[in-house]
Image (spheres, rainbow, N blue to C red):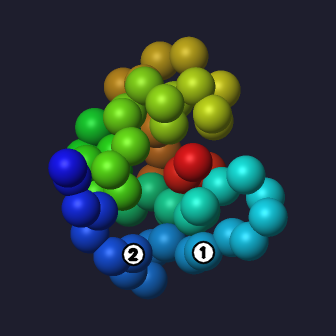
Amino acid sequence: TITPIPPTATATAVPSSGCRYIHIVQAGENLFRIGLRYGVSYSEIARVNQISDPTLIYVGQQLCIP
């Protein structure tokens, strides 16, 4: 079992939106590492956020974390 690291200032809990958190991408992050942080696969984050190329995310981008 993977225990997610508690969210920091870059994540906000979002009640009743289908997202557990909204994560704001910071410099140096990628979907794989963001997924590890929350215990969610990078492919699931990409699917939920309709990201066709999971290697392309941008600083400041808001991601729904299911």
Write the residue at 47% across / 18% down: 53
Q: Is residue 54 left or right of residue 63?
A: left
The spot of residue 63 in percent (x, y) is 57, 50
Write the residue at 50% across / 37% down: 45
Q: Label 1's element?
A: strand
The spot of residue 59 in percent (x, y) is 46, 54
Q: Residues within 10 Å of mark 1 (few under 14, many from 20)?
A: few
Residue 7 disc label = 2
Relative to 64, is 23 above or below?
below
Q: Circle 1 is placed at which residue position? A: 13
Write the residue at 49% across / 72% down: 11
Q: Label 2's element?
A: loop
Q: In the current view of this chain or complex, which residue is farthest to the right?
A: 16
Q: In the current view of this chain or complex, which residue is farthest to the left?
A: 1
Contact between labelled residues 1 and 2, with CB atoms less than 8 Å apart: yes
User: To which quarter of the image does residue 54 belong?
Assistant: top left
Q: What's the CA distance linking mark 2 and mark 1? A: 8 Å
Relative to 11, is 42 above or below?
above
| Three-letter code, disc 1 | Ala
| Three-letter code, disc 2 | Pro
